[in-house]
Amino acid sequence: DKTRVGWWKNGYPEYFGKVINAVDFIAMDLFIDDQLIDLATLTTEDFYWELNMKNGVLTRSYTVTTPSNKVRLSFERFLSIVKNEAAYIRLTIEMLEGNGTVKVISKLDGNVQNEDSNYDEHFWNDIDHGVKEEIAYLTTKTIPNNFEIEQFTVTAGMRHYVDGKLYTPSYQEGTLAIEGSFTFDLNENETLLIDKEVLIFTSRDIPEAQQATHLFKEFNELNVHYPQAKEEQTAAWSKRWELADVVIEGDDEAQQGIRFNLFQLFSTYYGEDERLNIGPKGFTGEKYGGATYWDTEAYAVPLYLALAKPEVTKNLLKYRHNQLPQAIHNAQQQGLKGALYPMVTFTGVECHNEWEITFEEIHRNGAIAYAIYNYTNYTGDIDYLKNEGLEVLAEIARFWADRVHFSKRNNQYMIHGVTGPNEYENNINNNWYTNTIACWVLRYTRENYLKFKEESTAKISDDELAHWQEIAENMYFPVDEELGIFVQHDTFLDKDLKPVAELSASELPLNQHWSWDKILRSCFIKQADVLQGIYFFNDSFTKEEKQRNFDFYEPMTVHESSLSPSIHAILAAELGMEAKAVEMYQRTARLDLDNYNNDTEDGL
Amino acid sequence: DKTRVGWWKNGYPEYFGKVINAVDFIAMDLFIDDQLIDLATLTTEDFYWELNMKNGVLTRSYTVTTPSNKVRLSFERFLSIVKNEAAYIRLTIEMLEGNGTVKVISKLDGNVQNEDSNYDEHFWNDIDHGVKEEIAYLTTKTIPNNFEIEQFTVTAGMRHYVDGKLYTPSYQEGTLAIEGSFTFDLNENETLLIDKEVLIFTSRDIPEAQQATHLFKEFNELNVHYPQAKEEQTAAWSKRWELADVVIEGDDEAQQGIRFNLFQLFSTYYGEDERLNIGPKGFTGEKYGGATYWDTEAYAVPLYLALAKPEVTKNLLKYRHNQLPQAIHNAQQQGLKGALYPMVTFTGVECHNEWEITFEEIHRNGAIAYAIYNYTNYTGDIDYLKNEGLEVLAEIARFWADRVHFSKRNNQYMIHGVTGPNEYENNINNNWYTNTIACWVLRYTRENYLKFKEESTAKISDDELAHWQEIAENMYFPVDEELGIFVQHDTFLDKDLKPVAELSASELPLNQHWSWDKILRSCFIKQADVLQGIYFFNDSFTKEEKQRNFDFYEPMTVHESSLSPSIHAILAAELGMEAKAVEMYQRTARLDLDNYNNDTEDGL
């Protein structure tokens, strides 16, 4: 977005970033006897919709009755995980009763917008399009921007098979769009199969000038067509499931939930490319814009470590290591030393536009470090820790050492002006979680640097190490002796404290019913905050401490982040609170399936 | 602006508002022998620029030398305060040496933008334009918007006199623009006077359909031309100065400063229309967008009370009384009772887009109430207080009573999540100033309601009155016994406290050199905060209290708001700190003349 609304201040990001929508390559319009089949206006029967999580094939079928015939339409489609650049669509048309003319218009369409498009702005310019023999292609390039963000070019191509035979429809070309038109007369009980094969290349892999040539070469070599492609897809997914399947007996909903989450996550990212990362809702909806968040390190890494090969996680760590210069830039934008990993990014440069998040929700920097610890600990890959790992850790530690301040009145170090994992409070002082993870980073980096000093590519001076130790030893942590809890932040206990149970159902989710003012001032917690710290540093706390903090905070937690119930489920299980653990598991596993937070439409 | 960038939350305003730029009616392009006179590229001599504060006439003159002649050009212009809809411009062209052809193009131009225009958006649509005899006119209407903000229509007309005689130039009409072209041959020592008379009517006063007719009627009746208009203007200003002039002997700069400020303020607002208010920088620059802020009540009202007739202030109070329904709407947007006067507004509805200001800088609500007290106290207009005054006070008091919360731990009322007058901190708890003015409103409203209950148009229940009293009696105020000061807010003393004197000059003003992150976490104060409260409620504090707070806070204050040094000057004078009082006076009086905060270009 190229607008700057209102008041820009030093340290605010230059732009707010989102992934833009791809050229639409799945579009296939259908006409029966010249009547457009539009599900929004037509009545259909026997509507069936299936996502097969074993192979990632989505099926949608329904029966349409017109005055002169009755037709069953089935669409099957999948994005190949065998050949990443390929997509397959099969349309099956069965003339159940009567006769008729069926027309299909299959498209590549670059005229796309997203929900945030301002001033009806489009994303793509048409670079080239055309038809060569049976293949239609469209090359598009992102429109120029004012932020020195690299433009990129995408070439999409399509070809079609009818009843298993290569078929060239009548192609029509327009700016940013190309359409192939098929017309067939079908008699009662006849069935027609139209397969659409799509290949897409981007300038991330293939330079713009070579994309068209490359596309035709790849189509020539693409000898795997619909039925076989689907078989190979099933085999590839079954390899993933062998490593990853979680079986829950006796509760189909719980079973479906966990598989659904794994399927969505593996569909979004499976570690093939260290230049890529995981958007919190993948590309299933527009919220979070497909960008990289701390969700990757804090919530996805543990899962990939457990359920995929270590290389998957290692590529996630490399992504951050590659972006270390940009993280140093982000810290410099705030006038601070070291590296500040962004809250939201594509390139490594911060591109989220809320100050209370951008330069306050800095606990994320700790999660980047924690993922290095987690990976090393799980895989034993000490080599990574010694070099790339310590390079990243050193810069994060430098950031923390500069971001704390010394309070003369308290004779301790403090961290003011942060937003903790609980984003329902902003600009708080001495968030227990943030102070905890900051100290942990200082200690962990120092210890490992001292251990691997001679071999490490990182360089840290003795003065720095001494200063880090001094900060870690003299950090202030808000605690309440009487309640025996860690306090979320300095003034949390001054609030009007009451349990979520006292709210009426009509007020939930709070973020859809309360003003932001009321939310910020309330005691209600969006997601685990103190408990997130207890989860990360589990060994450092006694069972009693865990129980007291859980019992204090969980009743005030509305779990309006998908990142909340999972942590609570794990801690509840550890504390033997079985009912709570199951409730939290259900909520985490079926969050989008059951639309707990009334936001499934934003993405999964 | 019609974009919504990023994350909109419940309670955020629907739009960010600014006054748009008027049709440009001053433009007069000049050509000598077909060469455009462009000050950005030509070299000129004897450049002279004068603002005559006695009559509001701006004069600009300079000499241009071309290969074949030497010409002195003088522009004089003023906006009439005798006839509000009129503007006068006189262009004097003296051929000092040689001969030449002088061409003048005098325009009405609706193709204007401001510095915030997004996507090159324009503001005006052309409704009508034309020429009738000697008068050219242009009727424009604001483009439609998505926020149900009323569109408005403006008709501007111009006519010209050459050497005192009515003259019809050759007019050219285009969309949103109309130009009158004059060409004259001048010989050495000849002088030409071109007077431009402009009238402007808006749909605030004259409905769109009648504007053109009205314009011609008014031009017909406008029998006062340049020299006489200037005389009448001078006489009208001299009446204002009779009431208002402040004389400072022995210091020309100090004298110029105060007159400059009075002139700017009186030029912006002199109380003729209760539908209008005062933008903090008037219309001299684009910052603050010409909108209404609390600056009016807190800083302008005391001045108008002292230096103009009481009606001027009364109209400012009526403006807020008229907007009471919108203020109630603003509170409802936050889920709160009563009225929340906006931080920034044109219509009474909040239109500033930073949450930390919009629903946190709520102390402004106190200033609206304080202005009622101030006006009543100064003028003795008890009638106003009894009716309109108490209606406004009651709703403001209701807001405060709902906005506080009761902290069980402290057994006191608190106000969390505010921004005080010091906007270099946001989202703080228990800002001493805010808590102070909130309690004062509750008390003052209750006392006056009890006094005038029978006669008042306001209605307040006994329960409400009792509750207000209870809050006022049990409010928490942060104080530090050891230092003997009122504490700006709960955790202010935990900061790294140090004086501005320890900063290097290159860091000032902070808002241009530091990131917002560093500013928020620092101890440096933008403008009087605790001291603002001491200034307002001067009688409630001992001299020792005033001195201790002044000595504690002033050294940490950077005065990067034009609202800061004035308050400090007054308190320093009261405390007998003469040097500091003079320093602060200089800074407040000559802020824009001497560009103390490096922001004069934003407006005066």
Image (cartoon, coloured by chain):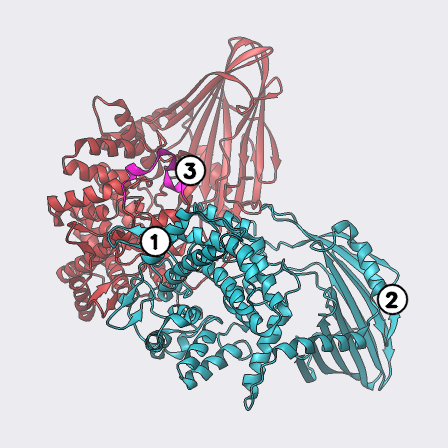
Chain colours: A cyan, B red
Q: Position of residue B298 (x, y in %)?
A: 26, 46
Q: Is residue B517 left or right of residue B537?
A: right
Residue mark closest to the camera, 3 vs 1? 1
Q: Label 2: which residue?
A: A168
* Residue B570 in picture, x, y percent from top left: 20, 38
Callout 2: helix, strand or loop? loop
Which segment is the magenta one? B498-514
Position of the C terminus of chain B, as image quadrant, is: top left
Distance CA(mark 2)–CA(mark 1):
73 Å
Which callout, 2 or 1, points at the residue further toward the start of the chain?
A: 2
Q: Is residue B506 within the magenta segment?
A: yes
Q: Secondary structure at mark 3?
A: helix
Task: Give percent across and percent down for residue B8.
Answer: 47, 60
- Farthest residue to the bottom: give it: A250
Magenta span contains residue A180: no
Residue designated by label 3: B602
Q: Label 2 lies in what chain?
A: A
Asked whether the residues under marks 3 and 1 belong to the same chain, the reply is no
Q: Which of these two is toward me, A380 or B431?
A: A380
Q: Is residue A342 above or below residue B505?
A: below
Q: Nearer the viewer, mark 2 or mark 1?
A: 1
> Which residue does the numbered mark 1 point to in the structure image?
A470
Discs 3, 2: same chain:
no
Judge depth for marks 3 and 2 and give the one in front. 2
Q: Are marks 3 and 1 in contact (CB under 8 Å)?
A: no
Badge 1 amino acid: Glu
In the depicted view, which residue is nearer to us: B563 or A403? A403
